Image (tube, rainbow, N blue to C red):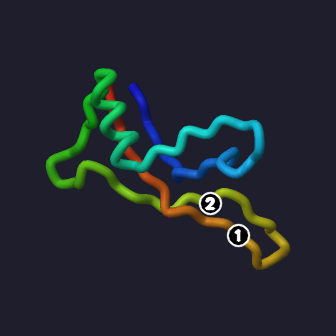
Amino acid sequence: MWVNVGPLLYHYSEMAGETSIELTWEEVLAVAKQIGFSIEVPETEQVEESVESTYCSAEKSMMKTVYNSKLIKARK
């Protein structure tokens, strides 16, 4: 079982000497299917769903980083 919730955030994409494989969401889904995962979707939902997820925040300040993250459930 694979439950994915998160943005496509590539921390090493611009760092010299670091390898960064940067797939689009469509490519991530295609690779998952190629290696044998099936995406589980209730009939009333889309293939993928987006949810807001807080990455970091400071309780005493106004700063908060929120991502519109992809949420999928897959089984192999």
Discs 1, 2 touching: Cβ within 8 Å = yes
In front here: 59 or 7? 7
In front here: 9 or 19? 19
Left or right, 69 with reference to 28: right
Q: To which residue does mark 2 refer?
A: 54
Eyeballing the image, is 21 above or below 68?
above
Which amino acid lies under the numbered mark 2 shown in the image of this protein? Thr
Residue 65 location, quadrant: bottom right
Please identify the residue farthest to the front as the structure is shown: 16
Residue at 75%, 47% in the rendered image = 15
Residue 59 location, quadrant: bottom right
Q: To which residue does mark 1 refer?
A: 64
10 Å crowding of disc 1: few (<14), some (14-19), many (20+): few
Residue at 22%, 54% in the rendered image = 45
Eyeballing the image, is 61 above or below 9?
below
Left or right, 62 with reference to 45: right
Estimate the x, y position of residue 20 in percent, counting from the top left.
62, 39
Residue at 72%, 37% in the rendered image = 18
